[in-house]
Amino acid sequence: MAEEKDIKKLMELMKQSISKNDVSSFDKNFKGMGVVLKTIKESDGYITPGEISKKTGLTAARVTVLLKKLSEKEYISKVQDEKDARKHYVRFTQKGIEFWDLKKKEFDGFLSEIIDDIGMEPFYRMFECIDIIHNSAKKIIKKHLSENNIKENTDD
């Protein structure tokens, strides 16, 4: 079985390789729940919907829809701010923690099986290629923007 350090390294490479915008657009195609759950998990226990939107790149409306679905499944609960009744936080319920832990274990097992099957070297080569392609695309886009006197968007 693959070592925990290999799984962590693979996750680190994936995070480095994929920009926030790429992740949020990929995630929108898969309903966004994973990225919202991950963002809640990484918070200090309480996070506002606005903070989730800012950290994930999902629209506030999309976050609202996803939080409603997660609340219906009893994975999260909402807590009203004591000082400002208009503001509320979300946090995991025990059921949500158990669901997250199960999915994380399943995903880690999936990655572990792939690593066991092919080793880490193909991943290193793949991410190296992705970086080369990404850097080339950025260079070409910058050149085309410059040639057409279009201001570069530096949000990513």
Image (tube, helix red, strand yellow):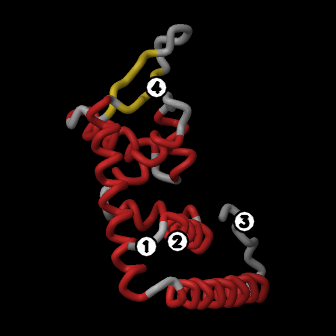
In the depicted structure, whether residue 57 falls above or below residue 17: above
On the image, the x and y values in percent for residue 44 come to: 55, 32
On-image quarter of the C terminus: bottom right
Give amino acid for label 1. Ala
Q: Is residue 16 left or right of residue 111?
A: right
- Image location (x, y in percent) of residue 65: 31, 42
Q: Which residue is mark 1?
A: 2
List the residue tagged with mark 4. 89
Q: Is residue 30 above or below residue 111?
A: above
Which residue was labeled with disc 3? Answer: 154
**Residues tagged 3 and 2 counted as in contact (Cβ below 8 A):** no
- Residue 79 place in picture, x, y as percent: 41, 19
Tell me the tag on residue 6. 2
- Disc 3 marks a residue whose amino acid type is Thr
Label 1 secondary element: loop
* Of marks 4 and 3, the one in the foreground: 4
The reply to whether discs 1 and 4 touch (Cβ–Cβ < 8 Å) is: no
CB under 8 Å between discs 1 and 2: yes
* Amino acid residing under circle 2: Asp
Of badges 4 and 2, the one in the foreground is 2
Q: Residue at x 65, y 90 (%)?
A: 132
